Image (cartoon, rainbow, N blue to C red):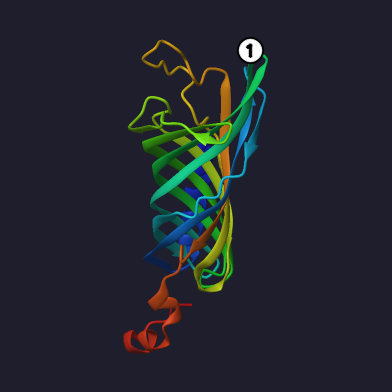
Amino acid sequence: MKKIFLTIIIIAGITFQARSQVKFYGSGGPEIIAFSFAQIDDQVRSGSNIMRFAPVFNFQFNGNVDFGKHFGLYFGGAIRNVGFIYEYSESGDELTTTVKKKYRNYNFGIPVGFKVGLMNSWLLYGGYEIEFPFQYKEKTFINGAKQDSKVSVWFSGRVPAYYNSVSVGIQFPYGFGLKFKYYLSEFFNQNYRANDGSHPYMDLKSNVWYISLNFGIFRNTRAYYDQKFREKEKKNYY
């Protein structure tokens, strides 16, 4: 799938390059993951996914290649906080215990994708991203009480070495946009073995997805929006 997607982008880029003047520029800005969920398939427990709201500023930077006014490619790098909340019940000794787990990773992502529309205004975009988790955290709450068994590990074996993900989004004028992202890779490494010999994530399948707010992601501020800059440089940016 990744090879097919990249091939389509390359072919489209070559086609537009033959017809249009190419523009290169950088852009970037913060991303706020407004709503985060997970598609969960738990073969052991019966639980529910709770919406995760994490108003943390994630940052992304992009290199842009525009083949005229209406089509472009992007690539870059990003640091983001991604996770989900899972609540389930455990029964024993005639008592039922409610367990809530909060999982999250800090990932370094490398996106590549395309954008169509008006490159300095409204546009749609979509692409593929590979993300490398480097800081894992897990918190446990039992019957609403936070436990001391917090896990915070760098480059943890509890999660895969990398994630595959796809995203689509819409950007409005002046850089504000909405994005939907889905992780094709499962959040956990089900084969992970703890020090006590247990496999805490065995049979727990979870694929994270989220909706985020993006600010200035493809905005080439001076070139597209600063009239004085355009007049001084005597350049026509669309």
Q: Which quadrant holds residue 148?
A: top left
Rendered residue at 38%/84% (across/down): 230
Label 1 Cα crowd, 10 Å radius (few <14 / some 14-19 / many 20+): few
Rendered location of residue 72, percent (x, y): 49, 61
Q: Which quadrant holds residue 152?
A: top left
Rendered residue at 61%/32% (across/down): 87
Residue ranking furthest to the top: 197
Q: Quadrant of the N terminus?
A: top right
In this image, 38 relative to 200: left or right? right
Residue ranking furthest to the front: 94
Rendered location of residue 4, percent (x, y): 53, 38
Q: Nearer the viewer, residue 39 or 136?
A: 136
Q: In the rendered image of this protein, does residue 28 appear above or below residue 153?
A: below
Quick one: SS at disc 1?
loop
Q: In the rendered image of this protein, does residue 146 appear above or below residue 180?
A: above
- Total numbered circles: 1
Rendered residue at 38%/89% (across/down): 228
Q: In the rendered image of this protein, does residue 45 appear above or below residue 176?
A: above
Q: Nearer the viewer, residue 195 or 155?
A: 195
Q: Which residue is mark 1?
A: 93
In this image, 92 relative to 16: left or right? right
Q: Nearer the viewer, residue 180 or 204?
A: 204
Q: Amino acid at mark 1?
A: Asp
Rendered residue at 65%/19% (across/down): 95
Rendered location of residue 166, percent (x, y): 54, 43
Rendered location of residue 182, percent (x, y): 57, 42
